[in-house]
Image: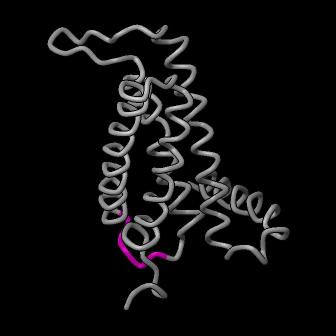
């Protein structure tokens, strides 16, 4: 556990090292969310690309009773990594002052992420199947849309702080 908290402290200090040029543009919490969320988003897009192009080789995933398109399967695979990483970064770096219990935060995080998954699914399907865009650019545009939803949900719902409690 000491190693975990040492890692959190290191990540926090590392993120804050980049903050001074942005100090006049945004509050520290917003910067931390942008930095950690940006990292997690970049990881998500990178994993999506690897899973879609190399692991799945752009092939449909047959489950026997259901077939999943490779671009949706790649999204689900990358999500398995970025969900826990995103929660930990949000809880311990971006929103450490939340007064809610950890299990409530995790439940609410899961709910906001479910909203993000639904939005991801809808927009990826829309961009790939209706607009006929390539999957990776579709994922990038979808991610930008989902970030706005996610930040709002996490700040005002998942990781409420005393200053927001009214």
Q: Up-down: is 92 above or below 110?
A: below
Identity of the residue drawn at 66% across and 53% down? 7
Residue drawn 36% across the image and 34% down it: 126
User: Quick one: which residue is furthest to the bottom in this view?
Assistant: 166
* Left or right placement of residue 138 versus residue 29 in this view: left
Would residue 141 appear left or right of 5 to someone viewing this image? left
Verify whether residue 141 appears in magenta.
no
- Image quarter where the C terminus lies is bottom left
Residue 122: % across, % down: 33, 39
Q: What is the basis of the colouring in this image?
A: one colour
Q: How many marks?
A: 0
- Where residue 159 appears, x then y in whole percent? 43, 70
Question: Closest to the observer: 39 or 149?
Answer: 149
Which segment did they paint magenta?
A: 98-102
Query: In the rendered image, which quarter contains the N terminus?
Result: bottom right
Task: Name the residue rendered at 58%, 53% in the picture.
Answer: 37
Magenta stretch prevailing secondary structure:
loop
Judged left or right of residue 17, residue 123 is: left
Q: Quadrant of residue 102?
A: bottom left
- Residue drawn at the location 34% of the way across and 18% of the way down: 69
Left-right relation of 46 to 74: right
Residue 100, quarter of picture: bottom left
Q: Is residue 138 above or below residue 90?
A: above
Residue 109 higher or lower than 59, as above or below: below
User: What percent of the width, then of the height, locates residue 72?
Assistant: 37, 26
Q: Residue furthest front?
A: 131
Percent of width and height locating residue 153: 40, 65
């Amino acid at each position: 556990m000491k190693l975990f908290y040492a890692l959190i402290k290191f990540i926090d200090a590392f993120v804050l090292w980049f903050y001074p040029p942005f100090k006049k543009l945004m509050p520290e919490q917003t910067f931390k969310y942008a930095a950690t969320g940006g990292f997690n988003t970049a990881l998500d897009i990178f994993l999506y690309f690897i899973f879609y192009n190399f692991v799945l080789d752009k092939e449909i995933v047959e489950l026997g009773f259901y077939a999943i398109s490779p671009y949706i399967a790649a999204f689900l695979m990358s999500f398995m990594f970025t969900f826990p990483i995103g929660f930990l970064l949000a809880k311990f770096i971006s929103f450490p002052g939340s007064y809610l219990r950890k299990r409530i935060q995790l439940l609410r995080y899961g709910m906001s992420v479910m909203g993000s998954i639904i939005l991801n699914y809808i927009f990826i399907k829309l961009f790939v199947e209706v607009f006929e865009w390539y999957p990776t650019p579709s994922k990038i545009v979808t991610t930008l849309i989902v970030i706005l939803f996610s930040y709002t949900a996490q700040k005002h719902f998942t990781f409420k702080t005393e200053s927001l409690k009214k």
